[in-house]
Image (cartoon, grey):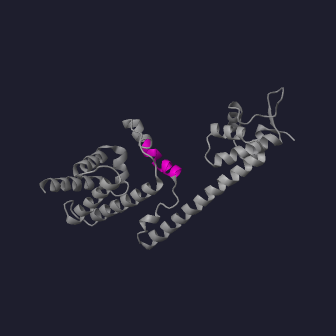
Amino acid sequence: MEYTVKEIAELTGVTIKTLYHYHKIGLLLPCKITEAGYRLYGTGELERLQQILFYRELDFSLKDIKKALEDEPSRLECLTKQHNLLNARRQRMDCLLKTIEESIHFTRKGVNMDKTKMFTGLNKEEWKEALLEQNEYLKDKYEFDMIKKQVIKPDKLNAQAAEAIQFTSDMIKGLKNGWKPNDDRIQNILKDHIAYLNENVNSTDADTFVNTAKFMIHDDFHRNMLESQQTGLSYYLYAAAELYAEKSLNN
């Protein structure tokens, strides 16, 4: 049995425009083109389209899908490989869903979740995705590729993210409670955070942190990252950092 482009679109949910594009790049060729110019697809093309869609679900690029299909000697081996990949993704998604459900549970109760569990399930590729928007911004505005310049180690990033969340949470708490930037509680929070950064991320001292805080005020993207969590947070952080640097200099 043969199907037109319109029938394939209705059967699979793939748009006609997408099918034309797959034909154009040689990913999915029709089995026949009529004298009137209609593209027709048979069972073999439907099976290939199914495999293409499975790979798309796995976030393969069209170029990689084409290569993968060319490298697979049989439909059975291709489907077996896709089954294994999708099963591995399902396991990661189950882990992520469990983390989200626990986050919702603790948030509803008003209890802070164990920070070591907040990023359970994130692997190397998922961290790249999480950092993508910020990295694209830095490349576009400052010609700095954050991802390219570091080796992504999920466990290390999970720990850094957990510490950063706790630090931000503590600063927001201080701001909401009306603690002044020179309050000992805020200054001790800064001291511990800077010590952590210096030991676990990169060389950081009081002056370096002041410059970072100043950058976050003047850069729209990073200021909005902080302000979206709590209005005034970026300025509060900068004021506290300056006071900490002054105190460190006097000591």
Magenta segment, prevailing SS (helix, strand or loop): helix
Q: Nearer the viewer, residue 8 or 25?
A: 25
Looking at this view, is 181 or 117 the one in front? Answer: 117
> Quadrant location of the N terminus?
top right
Q: Residue furthest top?
A: 35
Q: Is residue 45 left or right of residue 242?
A: right
Q: Quadrant of the C terminus?
A: bottom left
Residue 92 drawn at (x, y percent): 58, 58
Q: Is residue 159 left or right of 34 when viewed as pictured? A: left
The spot of residue 232 in percent (x, y) is: 29, 55
Q: Which quadrant of the figure has residue 17?
A: top right
Check the image and name the residue furthest to the left.
Answer: 250
In the rendered image, residue 125 lying in the magenta stretch gets the answer yes
Per the rendered image, the range of residues in magenta is 124-135
| 133 over 244 or under it: above or below | above
Question: With 77 as the anchor, is 120 left or right in this view?
Answer: left
Q: Position of residue 171 (x, y in %)?
A: 30, 61
Residue at 79% x, 28% y is: 37
At horizontal 63% and vertical 56% (from top left) the residue drawn is: 88
Residue 25 belongs to magenta span: no
Relative horizontal placement of residue 209, taking residue 28 as reference (left or right): left
